[in-house]
Image (cartoon, rainbow, N blue to C red):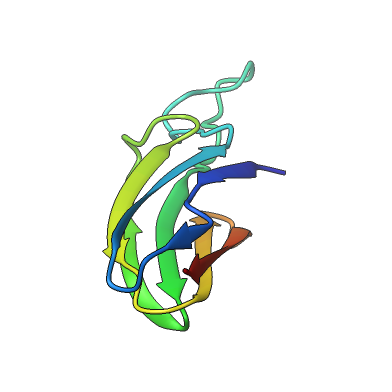
Amino acid sequence: MAKARVKAPKTAAAGEMVTIKTLVNHPMESGQRKDKEGNLIPRKIINAFTATFGGEHVVAAAFEAAISTNPYFQFSFTVPATGDLVMKWTDDDGSMIEQTKTITVA
């Protein structure tokens, strides 16, 4: 199973813009390579990323076959109050990798 690594601040001031850095270890397959018998290996990529904070959408992204193995994604948002940042990566097969970080307003 793939594993996500997230770098997020533990605390922030109310209204502060924070930067979140993510990296998900995932063995991507473009769907263009062939196996030993000459059959196409099915595509298996992270095709979507979403992040919510306190239940509100922060960012959403759709990815295509050109995305790299172990994709790195960085985004910024303004922290309104203490809450949980929930990030989800979705694979072609419907499986999800989820990571939650709590950011406390100090």
Q: Is residue 12 left or right of residue 85?
A: left
Residue 90 position in % (x across, y down): 52, 58
Question: Which residue corresponds to the image point at 53% horizontal and 43% vertical from the top-left?
Answer: 44
**As displayed, is residue 42 above or below residue 60?**
above
Residue 101 spot, x, y in % from top left: 57, 61
At x 29% / y 55%, what residue is drawn?
76
90 over 23 or under it: above or below: below
Instruction: Answer with the quarter of the image where residue 17 lies.
Output: bottom left
Q: Between 1 and 19, which is closer to the camera in this rendering?
A: 19
Q: Is residue 18 above or below residue 35?
A: below
Judge by depth and name the residue closer to the eye, 77 or 95: 77
Which residue is at the far top?
36
Q: Nearer the viewer, residue 58 or 81?
A: 81
User: 37 left or right of 8?
Assistant: right
Looking at this view, name the residue that lies furthest to the bottom: 55
Comparing 26 with 86, the one in front is 86
Task: State left or right for residue 38 relative to residue 73.
Answer: right
Q: Name the image quarter holding the N terminus.
A: top right
Residue in view at x 55 percent, y 21 percent: 38
Where residue 23 appears, as percent x and y from the top left, is: 49, 38
Residue farthest front in this picture: 106
| Residue 3 sits above or below residue 48 on the image | above
Query: x, y percentage for residue 4?
Result: 59, 45
- Count of numbered circles in the view: 0
Question: Residue at position x 34%, y 45% from top?
Answer: 74
